Image: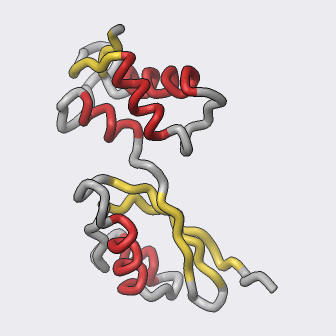
Amino acid sequence: MAKKIDGYIKLQVPAGAANPAPPIGPALGQRGVNIMEFCKAFNAKTQEMEKNMPIPTVITVYADKSFTFITKTPPASYYLKKAAKLSKGGAEPGRTVAGSVTMAQCREIAEAKMADLNAVDLDAGQKIIAGSARSIGLEVTE
């Protein structure tokens, strides 16, 4: 028989740097999950990735206080800021331009994120990434 699901916890955790400090500790602690067990498992799974890359994680907590977790690809904004060599997006998106990315860079990002995008094919994914770039104040060039 399948385990009874107690709930889900959604967090963005830096790759290879999970520790019991907030926000991880309090989020897991209130559900009664073993925090150190999660931190060790997460760090082991993400040790091959770039250090401190934000990884969206969905933790499924079961009634017996056990858990499983799924990691997703980093946010599009992380990839876009990295491609444009920026530390943060534009202060006034749509009015000022913080930097620029090419459509080829958008396509590379779409390839990396295709599993988590709501797109049928790569061209649609590329358009989604280009829209995300414009929304954080980047200019999209050919």
The location of residue 105, given as percent across then percent down, is 34, 24
- Residue furthest to the front in view is 48
Residue that protrudes farthest toward the bottom in the picture: 64
Q: Is residue 130 depicted above or below 29 in this figure?
A: above
Number of numbered markers: 0
Residue occupying the point 48% across, 82% down: 30
Residue 76 quadrant: top left
Work out whether 60 lies above or below 50. below
State the quadrant of the C terminus.
top left
**138 left or right, relative to 129:** left
| Residue under the point 44% across and 83% down | 29
- Rendered position, 24 above or below 109: below
Q: What is the residue that sits farthest to the right in this orientation?
A: 1
What residue is drawn where x is 40% and y is 78%? 41
Percent across and percent down for residue 100 are: 26, 18
Looking at the picture, how far across and down is residue 11, in whole percent? 44, 62
In the displayed structure, does residue 73 sit left or right of residue 105?
A: right
